[in-house]
């Protein structure tokens, strides 16, 4: 009585799968676009940042994420922090992950 006969009959055979694919295509396209515009470039930036942090050496001039500019005075391999001289005689410990930029390269690590 309240349901029209067209809805009660259901879909003709074979049209159910076609409508499902038609409904999923926009979602798949949105995901692909998001992947190439957002996720892939972010992964590339993370890899570049990790490589930069790994290659920080004594004598490099670095900029921290807080905006402090200083010269690296001590780097211990495997340690999560580095010593940075921000003024003459003023050394601070900075987490490696907080280094946002390496401006100039310093001397190589002595063996």
Image (cartoon, rainbow, N blue to C red):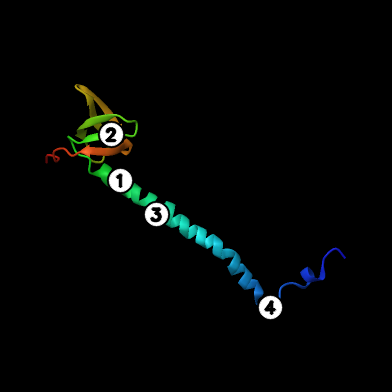
The percent position of residue 49, horizontal first and vertical second, equals 31, 45
Structural distance between the alpha carbons of marks 2 and 1: 15 Å
Of marks 1 and 3, the one in the foreground: 3
Q: Which residue is mark 3?
A: 40
Q: Under tag 1, what secondary structure?
A: helix
The residue that disc 2 covers is: 63
Question: How far apart are labels 1 and 3 at the CA level?
Answer: 16 Å
Mark-to-mark CA distance, 2 and 3 = 25 Å
Task: Give the spatial CA distance, label 4 vs label 1.
Answer: 55 Å
Toward the viewer: 56 or 67? Answer: 67
Marked residue nearer the N-terminal end (4 or 3): 4
Q: Is residue 71 left or right of residue 16?
A: left
**Element on which disc 3 rests:** helix
Q: Determine the residue located farthest toward the bottom in the rendered image.
A: 13
Question: Circle 4 sits on which residue?
Answer: 13
Residue 40 horizontal side relative to residue 20, left or right: left
Classify residue 2 by image quadrant.
Answer: bottom right
Q: Earlier in the sequence, mark 2 or mark 1?
A: 1
How many angstroms separate mark 4 from mark 3 (CA)?
Answer: 41 Å
């Amino acid at each position: 009585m309240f349901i029209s006969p067209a809805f009660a009959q259901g879909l003709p055979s074979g049209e159910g799968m076609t409508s499902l694919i038609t409904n999923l295509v926009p979602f798949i396209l949105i995901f692909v676009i998001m992947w190439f515009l957002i996720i892939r470039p972010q992964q590339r930036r993370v890899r570049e940042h990790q490589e930069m942090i790994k290659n920080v050496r004594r004598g490099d001039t670095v900029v921290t994420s807080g905006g402090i500019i200083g010269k690296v005075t001590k780097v211990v391999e495997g340690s999560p922090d580095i010593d940075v001289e921000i003024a003459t005689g003023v050394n601070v410990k900075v987490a490696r992950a907080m280094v946002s930029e390496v401006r100039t390269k310093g001397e190589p690590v002595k063996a």
